[in-house]
Image: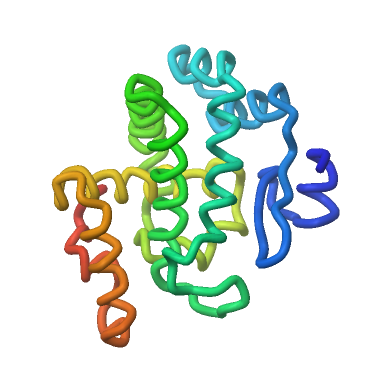
């Protein structure tokens, strides 16, 4: 799929990768992805972040494909045609986490984590005034950076849950996620995991 088809014909989201229940749309043009990720900076002078994306590898690009493929796993409770908007951050963040954890080596994983920590800090005041649980309500209505901001936070939240709260036991986090769903989603997922203040 070309970038133009992925962002103008099949979707109006300015990110040339997405999936539905039948098909994954993805542009494999590495140079376009590099330019897209540099645009996230909104013109801010951040040499380390810019250099990271200028030197982005095909392996890093493959993690985006991995993200889209992970959506099709049976790990998540919501279906593609569900109207639910709560807890979307969990699936999006987990798709990033699993894909990166399996495809990247530890140094590469640490590098992307560091970059996204910097990006969250850089844009927190501008785009961080909403709960992580509001991921699905406005993510696709704003600018590229406002959209990506929620992805960065979602990945970092999942990393925290798996590596800090669950001592690297990803199954424990999935069990808690399924318990939250099976018990009727009585509170928000960030309340269930007690991470309301994670990005404060």
Residue found at x 40% / y 33%? 116
Is 12 or 128 nearer to us in this picture?
A: 12
Q: Looking at the picture, does residue 67 appear above or below residue 81? A: above
Number of numbered labels in the structure image: 0
- Quadrant including the N terminus: top right
* Residue 89 visible somewhere in the drawing: yes
For residue 156, side relative to residue 55 (left or right): left
Residue 34 at what x, y percent from top left?
64, 24
Q: Examine the rendered structure and indicate whether residue 151 appears above or below residue 133.
A: above
Residue located 67% across and 46% down the image: 17
Taking the image as shown, residue 102 lies to the left or right of residue 142, namely left
Task: Report the residue at 20% width, 45% height from top.
Answer: 168
Asked whether the viewer can see residue 200, the reply is no
User: Residue 130 occupies which quadrant of the picture?
Assistant: bottom left
- Residue 135, image x and y in percent? 46, 61
Where in the figure is residue 115, as x and y percent of width and height? 40, 26
> Of residues 122 and 160, which is closer to you in this image?
160
């Amino acid at each position: 799929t070309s970038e133009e088809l992925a962002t103008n014909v099949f979707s109006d989201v300015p990110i040339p990768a997405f999936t539905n229940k039948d098909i994954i749309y993805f542009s494999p043009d590495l140079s376009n992805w590099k330019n897209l990720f540099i645009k996230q900076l909104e013109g801010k002078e951040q040499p380390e972040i810019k250099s990271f994306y200028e030197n982005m590898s095909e392996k890093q690009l493959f993690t985006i494909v991995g993200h889209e493929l992970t959506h099709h796993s049976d790990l998540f409770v919501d279906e593609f045609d569900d109207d639910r908007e709560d807890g979307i951050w969990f699936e999006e963040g987990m798709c990033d986490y699993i894909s990166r954890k399996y495809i990247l080596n530890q140094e590469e994983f640490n590098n992307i984590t560091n970059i996204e920590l910097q990006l969250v800090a850089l844009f927190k005041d501008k785009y961080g005034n909403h709960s992580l649980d509001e991921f699905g309500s406005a993510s696709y209505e704003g600018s590229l950076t406002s959209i990506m901001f929620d992805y960065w936070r979602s990945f970092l939240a999942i990393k925290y849950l798996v590596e800090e709260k669950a001592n690297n036991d990803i199954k424990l986090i999935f069990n808690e996620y399924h318990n939250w769903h099976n018990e009727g989603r009585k509170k928000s997922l960030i309340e269930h995991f007690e991470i309301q203040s994670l990005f404060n």
